[in-house]
Every structure is written in C-alpha cells, then in structure tokens.
Image (cartoon, rainbow, N blue to C red):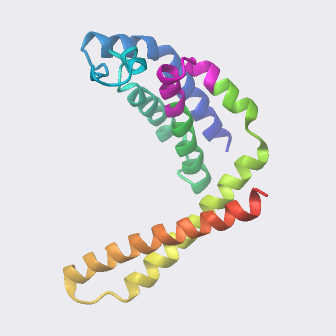
Amino acid sequence: MARVLVAALVAMIIAILSGPTFIAFLRKNEFGQHVREDGPERHLEKQGTPTMGGLLILLAASIAFLPLSDYTLPALTIFANAIAIFGAAVYSASALNVTPAAYILQTLSLLAPGDIWQGLAKSVVFAVLITLIGVSTGFSVSGGAEGVGRATTRSVVLAICYIIVADMIFSFFLNR
C-alpha cells in the first residue's frame, strides 16, 4: 500500500513540475479549444484553452504507477481514482477558474477514510461480479469463434447491468 501512495505522490509531483511546460507546448501547437461564435458568450472565454491537459495527468500517473505498483485490486482502484481526481482538477481549472492544486487540496480535505474503504469494498464486489459472470458465461460457450463472440458480448452486457444494480444497492445502504 505504501508503494501505491508513493506512486500517487510521484505522479502529482511530475504533473505539477511538467504541467506549465506541457500546457505551453499545447498552446504553441494550437491544441486549444475552438468555440463556436453562435454559442453562449461565457464559452468564448474558453477559446484557446488546451484540451489535452488530461493527457498530462494520465501520463504522469502512469509513469509513476506502473513501475511502483503491485497491480493488486486496491492499487488499480486507487490508480483509477487518482486519475479521476486529477482529470477533474484539470477540467475545473478552465471551467471553474480554480487552480488544479486548490481543487486537489480541497478534494483531499473533504475525503473521509470511510469513502476510501467504501470505494475499495465496491471494487472487490464489482470484481467478483465480473469474474462470476465471465466464468459462468464462458462455461456455456459453443459454436466456435462466433459463439465466443456472442458469449463475450453477453457477459459484458450482464456485468454492466449487475454492476449498476450492485452500485444502487451500495448507494441505498451506505448513503443514508
């Protein structure tokens, strides 16, 4: 678990240190957001805002996470959550005029230990659901490659439906 936290810290440092250079590169190469003139006026202030800033977050998190992680379910869950928080921080910088650092600090100050345990528990339940559905669908495959394709589609659709139902149950009992 300590390696995952170190990876998250390294990713944050990489993003903060390389962010200004990366955004300058995006602006120089005109990767900015183009806004239609017939849209709302408040959208015009976004003209030229780099639209690929999330790529910086993804690269920084991946560079730090991949060599330092054990690739366990909790590690992958924390990795995905960190990418989501960093992505939201980049989005909020342009949409809400909040610096990414302020967004991340505010998010982390509001994060309770129960939220982390809840997310880890949900990821375990979702992983078990996906595994059970995949295995049970896989055992009933027949008809060669076409049958495998149909079974894969069926298991993906079933897994999505079961995850939505399980998430609704979690929300009902844990957010009262």
Indicate yes or no whether the magenta region holds residue 99: yes
Indicate yes or no whether the magenta region holds residue 92: yes
Q: Is residue 56 left or right of residue 111?
A: left
- Residue at 60% x, 59% y: name it: 123
* Dominant secondary structure, magenta: helix
Residue 127 visible: no
Q: Nearer the viewer, residue 132 or 4?
A: 132
Q: Is residue 163 above or below residue 35?
A: below
**Which corner quadrant of the image does residue 106 belong to?**
top right
Q: Quadrant of the C terminus?
A: bottom right
Q: Is residue 71 above or below residue 39?
A: below
Per the rendered image, the range of residues in magenta is: 87-103
Residue 88 visible: yes
Q: Nearer the viewer, residue 135 or 65?
A: 135
* Residue 27, position as x, y percentages in the image: 31, 12
- Residue at 53% x, 72% y: name it: 162
